[in-house]
Image: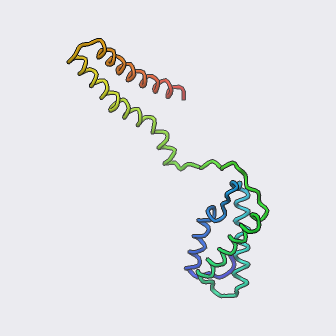
């Protein structure tokens, strides 16, 4: 931007750019990344034109916010300045922390499942089977053991395919 900005207005400009997607969102779909970059360029040009037109030097943060609101209003009133939104949402780019979390999640879930849930079932049905040695209790114990072993084998098979 060529217009001289006070420190407060520079901060307001940074905030408006951070909220760009929210200000320029539509209920009709999404803009492509190229369209969004072009929209941002056009919005900054229109903002600068409005600030130069006001003639105040340096530009106050209140004036910058007012000019930004006028640009956003102009965008919505003039049919998105000719840009056509698409219905396909862009895939969200994951951070390294998110990638690591989702990579580790199956392992953590397997530990919780086998260490807490299935062990509790095996212990419960094992105690029931030893207290009352009926066929029904033995079947429940065998099913709990089979489920525990089956889930661990399925997890190992699924992870070995990667």
Nearest the eye: 62 or 48: 62
Give the answer, above or below, for where 112 lies relative to 72. Answer: above
Q: Locate the N terminus and report the quarter of the image it occupies.
A: bottom right
- Seen at 43% across and 34% down, the residue is 107
Name the side, left or right, on which 106 lies relative to 121. right
Question: At which x and y percent is residue 120?
Answer: 30, 29
Where residue 114 sits, quadrant-wise, is top left
Residue, far top: 135
Quarter of the view holding residue 122: top left
Q: Is residue 102 above or below residue 10?
A: above
Residue at position x 74%, y 63% from top?
80
143 or 20, which is in the foreground? 143
The residue lying furthest to the bottom in this view is 56
Q: Residue at x 68, y 59 (%)?
A: 26
Q: How many numbered dots are placed on residues in this image?
A: 0
- Seen in the image, is 117 located left or right of residue 130? right
- How is the rendered protein coloured? rainbow
Where residue 45 sits in the image (x, y, percent)?
Answer: 73, 73
Is residue 64 found left or right of 78 in the rendered image?
left
75 vs 99, left or right, is: right
Q: Quadrant of the C terminus?
A: top right
Q: Residue furthest right?
A: 82
For this orientation, the residue located farthest to the left is: 131
């Amino acid at each position: 931007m060529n217009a001289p900005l006070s420190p407060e207005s520079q901060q307001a400009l940074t905030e408006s750019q951070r909220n760009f997607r929210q200000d320029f969102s539509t209920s009709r779909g999404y803009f492509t990344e190229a369209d969004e970059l072009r929209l941002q360029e056009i919005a900054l040009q229109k903002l600068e034109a409005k600030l130069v037109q006001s003639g105040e030097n340096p530009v106050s943060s209140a004036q910058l916010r007012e000019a930004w609101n006028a640009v956003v209003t102009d965008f919505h009133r003039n049919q998105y300045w000719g840009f056509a939104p698409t219905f396909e949402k862009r895939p969200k780019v994951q951070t390294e922390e998110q990638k690591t979390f989702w990579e580790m999640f199956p392992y953590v879930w397997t530990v919780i499942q086998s260490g807490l849930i299935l062990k509790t079932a095996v212990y419960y049905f094992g105690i029931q089977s030893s207290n009352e040695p009926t066929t029904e209790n033995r079947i429940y114990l065998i099913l709990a053991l089979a489920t525990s072993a089956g889930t661990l084998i399925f997890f190992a098979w699924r992870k070995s395919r990667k």
